Amino acid sequence: MANAEHRGRPAEAFQAAAVGDTGSRLHTVRIGLWLLAALLAVRQVAAVLTTPRGERLTDLETWFGHDGVLQVSGSLYASTRFTGTPFGGLVLKPLTRSAEQALGWGWTFGTLLLVVALGLIAARALPQPVGRRTASLAAPVAISLLMLSLPVRNTLWLGQTSIIPVLLVLLGCFVARGQRAGGILIGVAAALQPALLLFAPLLWFTGRRRAAAASGVTFATGTALAWAAMPQDSHTYWVHHMGGAGLGGRADDLANQSLHGALLRLGAEGPLEIGLFLLIGAAVVTLGLRRAVRYAHDGQLLLAVAITGCAAIVVSPAAWQHQLLWVLLTVVGAAGRRASDRLVWPVAVVLVMTLPATMILPNLSVLHPVRDNIVLLAALAAATLVPFLSRTSPYFRTPVPTRYADPVPTRFRHVPLLPFLRRVVTRPNLLLELLLIRVTYTAYSKVRLAATGGRERAEEHAHQILDLERLLHLDIEHAVNHAVVGIGWLRNFFDFYYTSFHFAVPLTVLGLLYWRRPVDYRWARASLGFTTLLALVGFWLYPLAPPRLMPNLGIIDTVHGVQDFSKPDYGTLTALTNQYAAMPSLHFGWSLWCGLAIAIIAPRMWMKALGLLHPLFTVAAIVATGNHWVLDAVGGALVVVAGFGLTYLFQGPRARSVTAAAVTDPAPGPQVPGARPPYPAPAQEEPARKQVPARSSPQPSARTRR
């Protein structure tokens, strides 16, 4: 007994130490997230208050300023500057004197406190039970996301009041004691934004009928008081505005992310538009409320509130960008049975609510209807389509786990540096990949465009490169360029190769790897990302004029035509690219990445050889067309090697490939102790091939091969 107790104490001490280490790490992460939230808040406030007066808080100035609509007598809607309800004007008018005195600092910090309160309430309203980690990190994460969101940034910048109705609804649903108090708060919110009256049926059908009645009575009382005090303004708002004419700008403006605005942008007018609006709006309200009631009964009241808010966005005559916070709150819903799919909806929502639509979708005319209405589409999806899981689902807490390959032995002790980035066997979610690739490439394009060092510095660096090439006897650009120009078909071939294959081949390689070799896809994608990141550093540190933009060298620009070197801005051919981002050459770097990836992964020698031909043709094309120096290609090769090296350093060697049967997405099912794994059995391999087991967590092993 003594020996057993003695042997047990170290184990208990070890467990206690492990728990203590976990708690310490969690505490450190929490402090870091709170510091991040504070930094974002300071940045947003500084961005507003450091802007010259007249360019910031413009809406607040037009309301409370010396000649603001709330200061002068007459109609609130004599101009298009006031877009609130008559009740809102009635409430705000007594505050004009104090607001004018505190215009700027007081209003901005007050709005900031409202945003913090909104994040704290949302974090506390997560469906129970909530794990310790989630409970500790939810508040700073929620506040950080709110600070980054476009609605909050616009509210701070314009001096809007759109945070108040959202906060009133959350206070009424989660903080107020008693149904009557909660209903009054929601009724006031609806009096400020009438579409929020949709929360009354949500309260009614979820058993809070006193709250529903109180919200309806409060809304009617506030509206009636405003109508009695300002009958002309009330008629303008409830007849003119609600009839579809809109306030605060054209109803079909891109900022109006409501169904009414979208239909007008798509060309519907008159009775057709009104009929479509009523029909689609009724369907959205019916489906949205049914889903919201179901999730409220399931214990996910915050998700139910967010869905109802999204439905209110859709059916409101005007839903300006600073009123669209309800979409962001839908990130609390769990969608997707597999762990690899669980992040798709949150990532999509965060991107939509924090980035301009032009960064998410390319500038193609066929995509303009989607791009122009992307927030509305997100609200529609949240209200009617996204299959959020109920808490009774076996996948709500434990989704089908991600499968990982066994780590490959390394030659160095500390490789990989990030062992938690294990090699995933199954392919990632396609929508999530497309979103991330698009946003990453847009950010790359903007950084590349901004990395300009000026014409003189770029030409000075070009002379340095040319002198070094002459020293190494590599200055072949002029000879190759003029030789190709004299042969028409060869010039056309290299021009076509330069302009067409730069994006087509890398995207094709990524697509084939995603389809046929999902294990290698992530490895190849990571190395390409590191390569591109290192190239951006080169563009910033060493702007370089290509041969075609160097005067007196006699290089002929075969792709863009003759340049007028007498113009001071001749190096800026378009507004879409930085012509001095030449060192290193990503034209050659991406082609070399393609060649190496194909040479490493392809099973046949002719495939490997064909893949290596691409960088050879590319280096010939970039030199022949006058777009790069030879040493630019050397720089491109260096960043590619460094990209593969960093991937090896952080994630370790490339994982073993797996059989087709082993990577097939399994039919998900709940985990039952003692049951067989839900994944299909791997196909039998040839006896001669060595088989290496693959690991899944926590699933039993599958089989892999080299």
Image (cartoon, grey):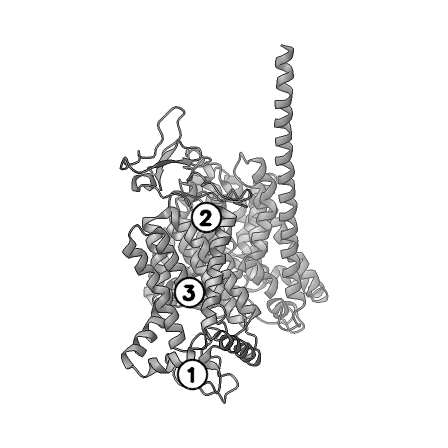
Of the two numbered discs 2 and 1 on the same chain, state the one appearing first in sequence: 2
Rendered location of residue 473, percent (x, y): 47, 75
Where disc 2 sits, the SS reads: helix
Question: In the depicted view, which residue is nearer to us: 383 or 466?
Answer: 466
Question: In the depicted view, which residue is nearer to us: 525 or 467?
Answer: 467
Which quadrant would residue 537 be assigned to in this image?
A: bottom right
Image height check: is 176 above or below 439?
A: above
**Looking at numbered disc 1 in the image, what kind of residue is underneath it?**
Ile
**Looking at numbered disc 2 in the image, what kind of residue is underneath it?**
Ile
Q: Is disc 3 in contact with disc 1, using a CB cutoff of under 8 Å? A: no
Instruction: Check disc 2 and report the residue beneath it.
Output: 307
Q: CA distance from mark 3 to mark 1?
A: 43 Å
For this view, does 410 lie left or right of residue 659? Answer: right
Rendered location of residue 157, percent (x, y): 60, 65
Question: In the depicted view, which residue is nearer to us: 85 or 321?
Answer: 321
For this view, does 253 lie left or right of residue 595? Answer: right
Where disc 3 sits, the SS reads: helix
Q: Is disc 2 in contact with disc 1, using a CB cutoff of under 8 Å? A: no
Instruction: Check disc 1 and report the residue beneath it.
Output: 555
Q: Quadrant of the C terminus?
A: top left
Image height check: is 540 above or below 650?
A: below
Q: Quadrant of the N terminus?
A: top right
Question: Which is more foreground, mark 3 or mark 2?
Answer: 3
User: Of the numbered discs in the image, which one, if any, rests on residue 372?
Assistant: 3
Q: CA distance from mark 2 to mark 1?
A: 61 Å
Q: Please, which residue is most extreme toward the top here? A: 1
